[in-house]
Structures are given as structure tokens and as C-alpha cells.
Image (cartoon, grey):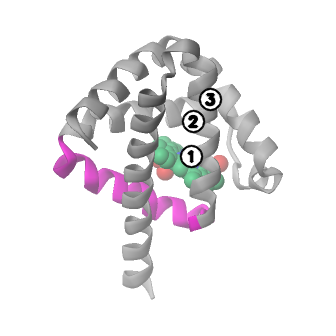
Amino acid sequence: MSPQQIDLVQKSFADVKPIAATAAELFYSRLFTLDPSLRGMFKGDMQRQGQMLMSMIGAAVSGLKNLETLAPVVRQLGARHAGYGVRTEHYATVGSALLWTLEQGLDEKFTPAVRDAWAAAYDLLSEVMQLGALEEASTTA
Ligand code: HEM
């Protein structure tokens, strides 16, 4: 990601923060429309789940300029996700639900450059998460 893309992601997330609860609701309803089979993976209270998701995205977004600090946290998150039953193919569905949600929330501020920057940020996070899941699999095998 370029420094400009990091700025775009950080600035646009600041616009999502005030509507985080609504964004989380929109996100899960879109996710379960795209793939209803994912619904059963979530055991807890969805409002609480939405808060955790938004706060983790917030932490990741603020950490983009400090990848050496962020990466271990995201690898561990990915390893836990493997334990929740999350597989490689699920990352694309979640990415598409996330971009769709940002488009709803940011409206005309969701320019093509902002979309590209978020797609790059999500790709980066999901790759590091999957790396964490692989490491976990190789140490527990
Ligand atoms: C950037 C990507 C993602 C972020 C930031 C994220 C964030 C989180 C966070 C913070 C939690 C709370 C538990 C924990 O910290 O371990 C969680 C749980 C969970 N996530 Fe994710 N997640 C991401 C991708 C995904 C994907 C691709 C799936 C696939 C469907 C998924 C499914 C789940 C499930 C099933 C749980 C556990 C729910 C439960 O215990 O009821 N997540 N996620």
C-alpha cells in the first residue's frame, strides 16, 4: 500500500466511526445474504461481535504505518479464525461485504481511489491473517 492509500483508509475510517454500529449491522446482513452458510459460524451476540469487528478494523487501520507491530496481532487473529472454522474462500466473501458496507456508509466519499485503498488494506490484512492460520496449522499438526 502506498502512503497515500494508507491516508485514504485512515481518513475514510474516521467517517465510518460515528456510524460504526449501523455499519456493523449492514455488514453482517450483507455477509449472510452473500453466504447464508456463514451464519452458523457466529455463536455470540451479534451486536457485541459487530463492536469487536469495528474495533479490530480500527486498530488495524491505525496500525498500517507500523506493520511490524501490527503483523503479530493480525497473525494471531488469523490463527483464532482458523479455529472458528474460517477458510481461505471465506475471506473473499467478507472482503466483498466490507467494501459494500463502506460504499453504503461513505456514499459519495467512496471514490474509486478510496475503494482501491480499502481493497489493498483488506488484502493485506487477510493475507497476514491466513499466514497466521497456516503457521498455527503447521505447529499443531
Ligand atoms: C479483516 C478481517 C477480519 C477481522 C478484522 C475480523 C475480526 C474479528 C474479531 C475481532 C473477532 C472477535 C474474536 C477474536 O478476536 O478472535 C472475530 C471473530 C469471528 N470472526 Fe472475524 N474478522 C475478520 C475476518 C473474518 C472472516 C473472513 C470470517 C469468515 C466468515 C470471520 C468470521 C468470524 C467468526 C466466525 C468469529 C467468531 C464468532 C463467534 O465466536 O461467535 N472473520 N473476528
Whether 87 is among the magenta residues is yes
Q: Quadrant of residue 10?
A: top left
User: Can the viewer see residue 24 in this picture?
Assistant: yes
What separation in Å lies between label 1 and label 2 (alpha carbons)?
Answer: 6 Å
Q: Are marks 3 and 2 in contact (CB under 8 Å)?
A: yes
User: Can the viewer see residue 56 in this picture?
Assistant: no
- List the single residue furthest toward the bottom: 141
Magenta part, dominant SS:
helix
Q: Label 2 amino acid? A: Leu
Q: Are marks 1 and 2 in contact (CB under 8 Å)?
A: yes
State the quadrant of the N terminus: top left
Q: Could you tell me how many numbered marks the image carries? A: 3
Asked whether mark 1 lies closer than 8 Å to ligand 1, one says yes
Name the residue beneath numbered marker 2: 99
Badge 3 marks a residue whose secondary structure is helix
Q: Label 1 amino acid? A: Gly
Mark 1: few/some/many CA within 10 Å (<14, 14-19, 20+): some
Residue 60 spot, x, y in % from top left = 35, 39
Residue 2 spot, x, y in % from top left = 24, 39
Indicate which disc residue 95 carries: 1
Badge 2 marks a residue whose secondary structure is helix
Q: Residue at x 60, y 62 (%)?
A: 86
What separation in Å lies between label 1 and label 3 (alpha carbons)?
Answer: 10 Å
Q: Label 3 amino acid? A: Thr
Q: Quadrant of residue 118?
A: top left
- List the single residue furthest toward the front: 112
Residue range of the region highlighted in magenta in the rendering: 66-88
Above or below, comparing residue 125 to residue 135 in the picture: above
Above or below, comparing residue 58 to residue 44 in the picture: above
Q: Residue at x 44, y 69 (%)?
A: 133
Q: Residue at x 21, y 34 (%)?
A: 3
Name the residue beneath numbered marker 3: 101
